[in-house]
Image (cartoon, rainbow, N blue to C red):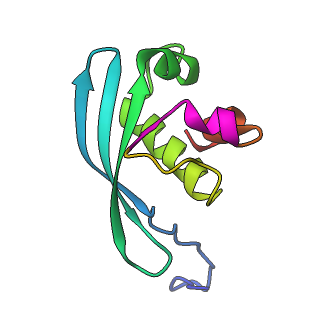
Amino acid sequence: MPSNAHGMLHCTKMPSPIEILNEQEVDGGWIFRIQVIDDDGTLQGRDLHLSWADYSMFSPDGATPPGRIAEAVMLVILEHPGSMPEVSTLDASFPRRYIKDADSRIRARI
């Protein structure tokens, strides 16, 4: 583990395997174009729809940027490979249908 000049250990945060390339407001919410870095280093593009209803559930006061919620949703999806259907556009509501305690897992990452 890296240490500073005083011998104190410090942790470095691992970079996110997710990069939001584009955020577009659409009727009823947002569509995010997301780039995902797989374990083998390859890049895959995915689209994620975040509805206003899901946004309000994860950010009742409206203070959390929608992109932060989209990133948290994708992190939970990536932690459970094979649990989601293969579709061209993922929806932020999918994890709660396929992953146990998904909403609390997403909230923990926001």
Q: Which image quadrant is residue 38 in? A: bottom left
Q: Position of residue 90 (x, y in %)?
A: 44, 40
Quadrant in which the C terminus appears? top right
* Near-viewer residue (14 or 48): 48
Task: State the residue at coordinates (22%, 31%).
Answer: 24
Q: Is residue 93 magenta?
A: yes
Tell me if I can see residue 65 in this picture. Answer: no
Q: Position of residue 81 (x, y in %)?
A: 61, 60
Q: Is residue 108 left or right of residue 19?
A: right
Q: Is residue 90 magenta?
A: yes
Q: Is residue 10 left or right of residue 28?
A: right
Task: State the residue at coordinates (77%, 41%).
Answer: 100
Above or below, 31 relative to 52: below
Task: State the residue at coordinates (65%, 56%).
Answer: 80
Tell me if I can see residue 109 in this picture. Answer: yes
Quadrant in which the N terminus appears? bottom right
Q: Position of residue 52 (x, y in %)?
A: 42, 16
Task: State the residue at coordinates (63%, 79%).
Answer: 9
* Near-viewer residue (14 or 100): 100
Q: Position of residue 104 (x, y in %)?
A: 71, 35
Q: Which residues are magenta?
A: 89-98
* Near-viewer residue (10 or 30): 30
Residue placed furthest toward the right? 100
Report the label total.
0
